[in-house]
Image (cartoon, helix red, strand yellow):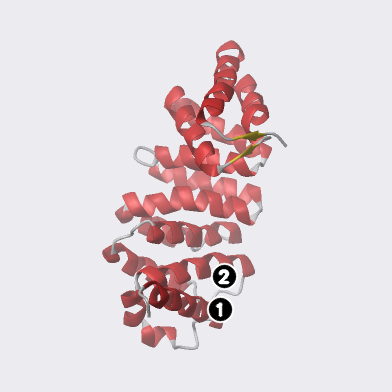
Amino acid sequence: MDSITKKGDIRNALNHCFQAYESAGLTAFAPQLHEQLLQKKVKFPLLEYAAMEIFSFFDAVVHIPICDAVAGYKTIGGNVILGILLKQRLPLHFEESFTKASEYMVAGEEWHVSDIIGERVLGNAVLQYPDKALPALWDLSKHPVNWVVRSIGAGSHLATKRGLEEAVARPLFQLLLHLGDNKDYQIRRGIGWAAKTMAKFHPSIIMENEERLQSEEIGSWFKRKVNIGLERHRHAQGN
């Protein structure tokens, strides 16, 4: 598999894609994008850069059709592209971004689809628009498909790791606790990941919820992840 390692090569690849679009529209752009980028080995930061270039080049009305086309190829890199496009649309199209993110995760049927999109769309939504994002995440927690619920964990992990304020982290942890008795393997993986990160960066919130954490309603898997996070916090403090 060929690799792309430089922004200049990303720009060259995108130029081929943009020329194809100008000649024959979206039906030509999507296959070119797949050939030029998505079938090659490209690190995530470069794919995110490519997504930002795509976002800037196209009018807003074309973004979702591009996402739909990219999602159809079911590539790991494609999930990065559409995740960033939906993230960039959050300010003006918040609900739509959540809806489309869920749609792509359901169709993707893989853990990496859930995590890649969850981090970029849900995680950045919590960081930037917590008043909208927290109720939206509670709604997603009721979703019938486990990949979507798992993505709450990926988004919560990213937001917490990127400096989520305690005032937002506190109610977010209540959502994680709400899912702390889940029996689904994929959901446990995602939510446990977030619980571990929360404990590492906000141990005081864990202490505030110590009584509930000791209750039988919270799964041992959740408690174990919290303890790992607390240990990592202590280690980071030199204790």
Dot 2 falls on a residue whose secondary structure is: helix
Q: Quadrant of residue 24?
A: top right
Identify the residue under disc 2. Answer: 188
Please, what is the three-letter code of the amino acid marked with disc 1? Trp
What is the x, y in percent for residue 238? Answer: 37, 76
Q: Quadrant of residue 14?
A: top right
Residue in the picture at 73% in, 37% down: 1
Above or below, 175 relative to 50: below
Identify the disc placed on residue 221.
Answer: 1
Q: Is residue 145 visible?
A: no
Residue in the picture at 57% in, 35% down: 5
Q: Is residue 100 visible?
A: yes
Residue at far top of view: 23
Front residue of 113/61: it is 113
Dot 1 falls on a residue whose secondary structure is: helix
Marks 1 and 2: in contact by CB < 8 Å?
yes
Please, what is the three-letter code of the amino acid marked with disc 2? Arg
Residue at far right of view: 1
What is the x, y in percent for residue 116? Answer: 54, 50
Residue in the picture at 45% in, 23% down: 57
